[in-house]
Amino acid sequence: MHTTGSRPRLVVSTDGRGVVSHAGSRLLADLADATSLTHAFGDALRRLRPRGIGHDPGRIAVDLAVMLADGGEAIADLALLRDQPGVFGAVASAPTAWRLLAGIDPAALARLRAARAVAREVAWLQAAETRDGIPASHAGGRDLPGLVLDLDATLVTCHSEKEQAAATYKRGFGYHPLLCFLDNTGEALAGVLRPGNAGANTAADHITVLDAALAQIPDAHRHGAEILIRADSAGSAKAFLAHIRALRSRGIRASFSVGYAVTEPVRRAIRCLPEHLWHPAFEQDGSLREGAEVAELTGLVDLPDYPDGTRIIVRRERPHPGAQLSLFDLDEGMRHQVFLTDTPYGQSSLQLLEVRHRAHARVEDRIRCGKTTGFGRFPSRRFQINAAWLELSLAAIDLLAWTQTLLVTGELATAEPKKLRYRLLHAAARITRGARRLHLRIAATWPWRHDLAAAFTRLQALPRPAT
């Protein structure tokens, strides 16, 4: 008997010097400084430092966001940054961070959101000067004009009693936050923490989150670009769509694409639709989607009190194994999905409108990744602390998105946070001193060392806002 391979013998000790882990996360901390997020957070939370001594509240908030972007799940995980002062400097203790979160009342939370908008404008200007600006959203193998905002709610389970946590419609217990992501870059524009029993289709909450998201978009884009708002059927409330239409009177070129329930009038319209009016559906790469077709039901279904020009479109396709089908779908042998849009005739083909709406499903990936970047677990029994935690997790998602927009290229520019952490943020390095400089020496055998070094080089080259 012989072995097929062996590992070298190791003698383990705890006397290593100058060795640091998660060295790539310094990239996020420096990017927060370069986009003025640290400074803006400091201004927003200045009242929480009345004597002007101790840790700067803005720096604590940024350190919490960096920790969440790095994959931390609890305030105690700040120790990873704090125990490496050679890389991250002086980092607040967990009790100090708790006191900061406890001091963020609704007014301070509003200032944090305004601070994020200030930093976002800087980041977008940097993208315009160093790259090709904010990338376009894609659907059907084409670039979509302007900006695309995706709204969706998610359930977050709480395993202990927390203020305003409640039973959910899926018979769980926790919170039901409503969120808005920018599909172009993956940035988390806005979110509101809600009790677990909050309605999924509450128009008032959708309006609140949409207005908060629009406030995050720099003026030149908010009033100069087309903005498409997508949602599932929870966003088809008449009041919400009327609000989107009313945005046009404020100079915002907004339109909508939202899911719609397959009601009895819709079923009757589908049954009477001639076969020659069904057209082949597209895949996201622009190729034909096998077994799927789209058709327009506008004029066949009454849509009272909806904005003028609202169109109703249906897709049918052969159901995949395990698909949840209604009795109507079982009877027809096809799965049907319906959505509403106010995109005028002639601007896009029927198939492109449908594949554009179907791309809304990407928000599910944003939410899944967001739950590993902070809002999958809430740290406190107090609702207001958890609301502040949600806001910092949105800032953490933004830091990851800006890193990909401004600092990396290739597959890392579209990688999910897990891959970004594994390849860049969690890299090990050594700290050395020489020629009056502090050197971060990434391991020579690390496969992505050149990507990380290039990201730091691009970071240094970013134009800084005038102060």
Image (cartoon, rainbow, N blue to C red):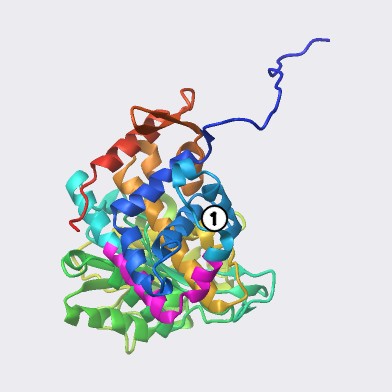
Q: Quadrant of the N terminus?
A: top right
Q: Position of residue 465 (x, y in %)?
A: 20, 55
Assign the magenta stretch its main secondary structure: helix
Q: Quadrant of the C terminus?
A: bottom left
Task: Farthest residue to the right: give it.
Answer: 1
Tell me which corner region of the image, top left, top right, bottom left or bottom right, holds residue 163: bottom right
Mark 1, secondary structure of its residue: helix
Q: Which residue is mark 1?
A: 372
Q: Is residue 346 left or right of residue 106?
A: left
Residue count near mark 1 (Cα–Cα under 10 Å), binned few <14, some 14–19, many ≥20: many
Is residue 467 among the parts visible in the rendering?
yes
Q: How many marks?
A: 1
Taking the spot 48% from the left edge, 37% from the top edge, the residue there is 423
Tell me which corner region of the image, top left, top right, bottom left or bottom right, holds residue 455: top left
Q: Is residue 176 left or right of residue 223?
A: right
In the image, 347 versus 291, the foreground residue is 347
Question: Which amino acid is tagged 1?
Answer: Thr
Q: Which range of residues does the magenta coloring cover?
A: 97-118
Q: For residue 209: magenta? A: no
Q: Position of residue 95 (x, y in %)?
A: 58, 64
Q: Is residue 167 left or right of residue 463?
A: right
Tell me which corner region of the image, top left, top right, bottom left or bottom right, holds residue 176: bottom right
In the image, 142 versus 226, the foreground residue is 226
Tell me: residue 417, above or below residue 386: above
Q: Position of residue 162 (x, y in %)?
A: 64, 76
Task: Farthest residue to the bottom: give it.
Answer: 305
Taking the spot 40% from the left edge, 76% from the top edge, the residue there is 108
Taking the spot 39% from the left edge, 63% from the top edge, the residue there is 58
Is residue 362 among the parts visible in the rendering?
no
Tell me: residue 187, above or below residue 314: above
Q: Position of residue 63 (x, y in %)?
A: 46, 56
In the image, 426 versus 57, the foreground residue is 57
